[in-house]
Image (spheres, coloured by chain):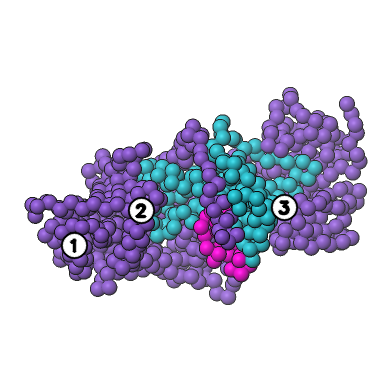
Chain colours: A cyan, B purple
Amino acid sequence: MIEDKLLIWKFKCGSKDALRRIYEKYKNELLKLAVVLVNDVNAAEDAVQDVFVNFAQSAAEIRISGNLKKYLTVCVANRIRNRKRDQQRHRLASIEDADCAISDLKRPEQWAILSEQLKLLSSAMAQIPDEQREVIALYMQGNLTFRQIAGIQNVSVNTIQGRYRYGLDKLRSLLDSEVTK
Amino acid sequence: MKPADNIKKFFKNAAISTNPKADQAVFNEVLTAQEKMIEAQPAEFKPSVWRIIMKSRITKFAAAAVIIIAVVLSIIFLDKSTPSAYALEQTLKAYDGIRFVHIKDFKDGESEPKEFWVELDEQEQVKNLRVYIPAWDMPSEGPKIAVWKKDKLQVWIKNNNVLLTIHDKTRGLEMLTLVKQCDPRFVVKELHQLEAEGKVDIKTSEPLLKSEPIVITAKFLPQSNDVGQIVLSVDQNTKLVTRAVLNQMKGFGGYQNSGLLEYSDYNIEVDENVFTLWEVPENVTRIDQTGPEVGLAQAELEDDEIAVELARQFLQALIDKDYDKAGNLCGGIPAKVIQRMGERMSYTKIICIEQPTSRPNNRSKQAISVPCVFEVNKNNEVFALRKNIHVEPVEGKPNIWIVSNDNDDEIAEITVDPTDTTSTFLKNINSKLASLDINKSTADDIISVLGKPLSYRFKNEVFEEDNLPETYVMTYPGYFMVSIHKNQIRSWGSEEIPGYVFSGLIQIGSTLDEVLKEIGPPEKIIEGFRLGAKKFEDNILYKNMNGRKGYCYYGTINKGKKIRMLFRDNKVFSLHEYRTEPIKNIE
């Protein structure tokens, strides 16, 4: 959209206002995406905050012609995937709880406030496999295309569509009573 | 309704909001990050050039110019549906023949604007571009002048007297795409759509006096997801835009000015020097990435192979103090610039280069990160550093790769602080551990031999030494850690950084083959184990876990010692020895 291109341009020129506008414009959508991806509000908050902090430091790398929303969406998804990967590594590395992960510095107050419906959705999403969850979240909430998601997951579009269908079936069964309301 | 529609609706209705206080706290941190980024402009020559080449690349200026054109041309068509006497076709027609425009971009509080001179060809594609960036934009770098012609961008950084030349086909295409997006058909179509959806409100004011401009106010409504307004002034006689005021919404209601653009010199006769850097002095330092000798040719190598080879050659060049070569591999950075980097510490040895990973960035989808562990000497102290070296193809030359040192937002670099004592600590770790018995030694014994740890931790908590829980981990430099339970040792071991050696041979970086050769084959191999599904069993080699090739686990008892290892790319990255006797239940 035109406004995004202007915002990026201004942001690249060092505008704090542009950064604030970008933050205001996308924080809720990104938080929601992160919540459904990770089903952990603290982790979701951390991921989105990290993405914005890194974004603020990467003015030179951001393309004006790119799609800002999609860029941030992919950043959040990657951040969460990295977090899961690190957790798995630490889970192993910390066999018998020899875990020395650096403690997270938490914000004094909860940043994201979830509606009951989002809590329900997030909880249901947590019960479907990672790959399927990511496809559904990126497609439904991130508005990415199957082709774009295929690029992210490094698999074919057909595989993505399969994951989407399976995930959707599972999600529907989990939310059965809710989605028909 | 389809199931997908139901779920989509569910997604849409699942609302989220934010706590204003925390919201502000988060944004403050984001803002601080931006400020630090802007302020982090070291005065010395090297970092500035490094950053310019590897991060900014100056092309933003060129792109900025184009987006201005995009704004102008886009907004011209905003009044398609307004019932004014001023007709869209008049401006469309006026712009038909426009081939040159001079743009000034003013910032509040600064008298000197950024300036752009843009020439279009017959197909209305950007043909030539000149950009002037005043010193206030980036005070540490000072003023800059850039010219762009076809696929080549040249930037003169006046204060540093550096002339950077790069091939810029990608950015060129980007610019052309942006211009294309200003095609009336495209813009009108999009705005029609927005208007039909009630997302844009357009008002046109056409004064009676011909000397006064037509004012077009385009307001993006909240439902458009674009908040802000743009006010254009259009010359009544020429029907060309003369200025644009960009307003962003401020709080609830009201706008604040966020930019003023002035357009002039439409179709003036262009001086031939406008699109050349005639000002550049003879003694300028030239960094030219367009020459055939820059970077490393990919030849028949796969992307991963060229990435590893490039990282290896770059490190080796630093070790050999061959700064010409290192600079060349960095895309043409002068040797003296690299030499300054090399003078800070001496690169002495490549310890290992791990499996590279794809790290696409905004310039290249092929960009790759290569984790490298190498040894450096600083002030006569030897350190092991682990750093990801980023490489990517040169823009416009896909078969030539360079070190880009790009810090993209998705990579967590593990860089050991050279001021720590990692190397010296790990240097003596094996001889020190030899004096301890893992089954009998206590936490106090560990401290007496290894010294006090950097921290006492358990999961995410950090403890004071006088208030320790029953179970905790003592952490030492170089990711060496000792797990303690009831004051007895449960395990010790290391991650990521070589130094600690098990049984005299196995260490971080050892290959799976080397490990199996040393401690013998497993009783069983399980492929594709899913982490978290169940616990590992000893003497079983878990290969390619989670479907990830080379990601393995193996735990066994060898020569009376219990060892557990994790492998990434079939190389040990986590190595821990465990006690073989049960923990004594000491109260």
Q: Nearer the viewer, residue B461 or A176?
A: A176
Q: CA distance from mark 2 to mark 3?
A: 54 Å
Which chain does tag 1 point to? B
Magenta span covers which residues? A137-161
Determine whether, in the image, residue A8 is placed left or right of residue B467: left
Same chain under badges 2 and 1? The reply is: yes
**Residue sitting at the far top:** B466
Taking the spot 30% from the left edge, 39% from the top edge, the residue there is B254
Question: What residue sits 59% from the left and 57% below the top?
Answer: A136
Residue B88 in the magenta stretch? The answer is no
Q: Main secondary structure of the magenta part?
A: helix
- Disc on res. B199: 2
Mark closer to the observer (1, 3) = 1
Image side of residue B255 versus residue B89, left or right? right
Determine the residue positioned at 86% across, 48% down: B562
| Badge 2 or badge 1: first in the primary sequence | 1
Which amino acid, by three-letter code, is at mark 1? Ala
In the image, residue B24 lies at what x, y percent? 46, 35
Q: Is residue B71 above or below residue B31?
A: below
**Residue B323 seen in the figure:** no
Tell me which chain the residue with mark 2 is part of. Answer: B
Determine if the magenta segment contains residue A151: yes
Q: Which residue is mark 3?
A: B573
Q: Secondary structure at mark 3?
A: strand
**Residue receiving disc 1:** B87
Mark 1 to mark 3 CA distance (whole Å): 69 Å
Residue B381: where, in percent of width, then height? Answer: 63, 43
Residue A125 appears in the rendering: yes
**Mark 2 residue type:** Lys
Depth order, front residue of A21/B446: A21
